[in-house]
Amino acid sequence: MSALLDHLPEFWQGLIVTLQLTAASFAGAAVMGLVIAALRVSPVPVLRGIGTAYVETLQNLPLLVLLVLAVFGLPEIGLQAGLQVTATVVIALYEGAYIAEALRSGVNAVSSGQGEAARALGLTFGQSLRHVVLPQALRTVIQPIGNIFIALTMNTSLAAAVGVVELTAAANRVNLLEAQPIPIFVGAGLAYAVIAACAGLVTGRLERRLAVVR
Amino acid sequence: MSNVLFDEPGPRARRRIRIATVAGAIVLLALVALAVRQFAANGQLAADRWQPYATWPMWRYLLGGLWSTVLAAVVSAALSMAAGLALALGRLSRRPWVRMPSAAYVETVRTIPVLVLVYVVLFALPRYGLDLPLFWKLVVPLTVSNASLFAEVFRAGILSIERGQSEAGLAVGLTHGQTMRLIVLPQAARRVLPSIVSQSVGLLKDTSLGFVVSYAELLYSGKVLANYNGLLIQTYIVVALVYLVVNASLSKLARTLEARQPRRRLFRA
Amino acid sequence: MVSMRRVAAVAAVSMVGLSAACSGTDSTSSAVPGAPKDNSVIAQAPVASAAEILPGSTMEKIKQRGELIVGGSLDAPLLSQQNPTTGEVEGFDADMGKALAKYIIGQPKVKIVNAASETREALLSNGTVDVVFQTYTITPERAEQVAFAGPYYSSGLTIAVKKGAAGIAKPEDLNGKTVIAGANTPAIAAIKQLAPQATIVTFGSDPECVQALKQDRGVAYVQDETLLVADAQKDPTIQVVGSPFTTDPYGIGLKHGDDQFKKFVNDWLTKIQGQGVWQQIWKGSLGTVVQGEAPTPPQIGSVPGS
């Protein structure tokens, strides 16, 4: 236990980096997901193709491969950023593909009669999206997006492999010094579980709030 | 195409779609061209940097890595499906002393990164005298983690079977176990098949953690190759393409399976 | 355990089969230093007399098995690096393992078990591997858990920077700077000790570290001297500064308490050093990137813990 307490500053620092990675890349993933979902349901074939290609590529590559490629490959095309920034962007792009799919299936789950009815009432495209389709779609995607958030949190640990000292890397370093793996890794695991539990709480509450009693 | 958002396009809409198509294509091509040009400007497209990947020995080595990847994925998929089914049944059990531990396992393990589990097996267990061979150092954490994910897939599948089915089973005098085995599970299995395949894609991707364990799967083979020929970027691009081809084929299979049945998928990968 | 062995065996067999099927398409990149193609060195290596393989000893067990199981790496250039073209593991450590196998068995039959540096003690004590050849620095702490024959080689950490970078000549200069090191390498502890104010960034492999140095992810890269010399030779944009600032005597890891086997291995080491085999192994591997003649091997048993 003392190994954990002696190195609290390192753990704290790692936890902060993990939280930064999680928050920033989730925000990025949400934006990216929205854009890609929009592409995938757009009436323009090329845009749809781009959206599909994006989702297919990102969902079928291991995040670790993407991270390594981005960290070492992007500077070669003149795009160099700090390690943590690169990792954040890569995780955001990767999870964006999953959020896009969740959103798309949410939109598709709204029965087409709803959209037709909205248009029949003379609502514009924007209005029917805002007042009719999205409110119903969001309700069904809260749970999937909560799951994506948890997956994203866990995936931030892979940033450790490209030199970002987040929680997992911090735990590994402390373990190299103290050689007390059990308390150290259990502590790190618990921290992730707590983050995930918070996410679960929030999604549960949101879902109850938006639930429609039929 | 979903019709929630649009009606069939009329003449003006079609014209706008054509314009957007052309504009989109131009932007896309411009971006690709820019990236390629930058890459070439840095000498990363030079023929001698790619030439090794036109030779058979390099591919033979990478395919050996792919074989190890597939092996690790298949073994851990089989083990975690078995464990996942047990956990799912346990979580649906009427006995609290079975239900509670199963639920606790699923809910906890689902929220712990596989990498942390890998580190436990890699660093913690040897300390207590349990030093697994490399293969199992990768497969054990993957199994522990994926069991909880498969459990949720199976549970969702079992719950999706209409109550009338099991009620009918009980009504004709089958026991709970028989109803589950003979009536609910066969139907549930068919329904969760697409989710299982796409979950397996996720598992296959997770085997890239062999990179950390130094189990010679595809990504680690790429690392050894890059160490040998110093072509870091080219090697990882080739490795990425191999993953893409394999996983895209599996995803395609999942979609085909899904299209064959009326129900929608229950879970994401 | 069994299945992992089987996997390795299957992989090995398929590689051998495939390489037999398509020899002649050999065209690896030219950027490969020190890949000795001929095993003439091993051919000259001695074989122990029957009297030296004592009955009931570890050597006899290995001889009966017909294969020496070595804990090592596949991705350490110049030391123990798998050649993807042939499937062979090449380098100084790998050739030492082959020479020892030949000494015991009569043929250089080696199986390398990929060992992470944290698990070597466990691999030795539970008998998964017979010996460890893996830049295994002899320390008194480790000697409480394993036995060390040797040292058979002595190396040290040094610093590489981008060509033309100024202001870094010794480890103390790294204070307050960002330094690149290989994950889980001894460099991390050494930097922490000599330059406590340095920020350390770690990457998984040597090419990644070199790439990171070239992309300015850190101002310096701390690694074993021989590796850095090889890197600097491959890539003219980086250079090695100063001379090694640590001394790492590498030992041959053996099971703790097996004094008979330890003496046997030490005798073998003396023999191959006397016959010049050690020197030739050095020339065929590390010597391909380091100028000059083979160094004098370190005195056996000269280090605390050996």
Image: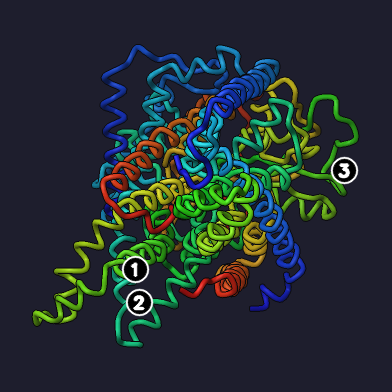
Relative vertical location of residue C195 with respect to residue C33 in this rendering, above or below: below
Residues packed near mark 2 inside 10 Å, few (<14), some (14 to 19) or many (20 plus):
many
Callout 3 and callout 2 share a chain: no
* Amino acid type of the residue that numbered disc 1 sits on in the rendered structure: Arg
Q: Determine which residue is flagged by label 3.
A: C173
Relative vertical location of residue B230 with respect to residue C158 in this rendering, above or below: above
- Image coordinates of residue B214 in percent, x first then y, are 48, 46
* Amino acid type of the residue that numbered disc 2 sits on in the rendered structure: Arg
Residues packed near mark 3 inside 10 Å, few (<14), some (14 to 19) or many (20 plus):
few
Q: Determine which residue is flagged by label 1.
A: B155
Q: Which of the two residues, B93 or C36, is positioned nearer the viewer here?
A: B93
Q: How is the image coloured?
A: rainbow
Point 30% across, 17% down: residue: C22
Relative vertical location of residue A187 with respect to residue B9 in this rendering, above or below: below
Q: Which of the two residues, C287 or C28, is positioned nearer the viewer here?
A: C28
Residue B124 visible? The answer is yes
Callout 2 and callout 1 share a chain: yes
Relative vertical location of residue C213 with respect to residue B90 in this rendering, above or below: above
**How many numbered discs?**
3
Which residue lies most toward the left here? B172
Q: Nearer the viewer, mark 1 or mark 3?
A: 1
Residue C223: quadrant of the picture: top right
Q: Secondary structure at mark 2?
A: helix
Which residue lies most toward the bottom here? B96
Residue B91, numbered label: 2
Q: Secondary structure at mark 3?
A: helix
Q: Secondary structure at mark 1?
A: helix
- Image coordinates of residue C149 in percent, x first then y, are 50, 50
Point 38% across, 49% down: residue: B198
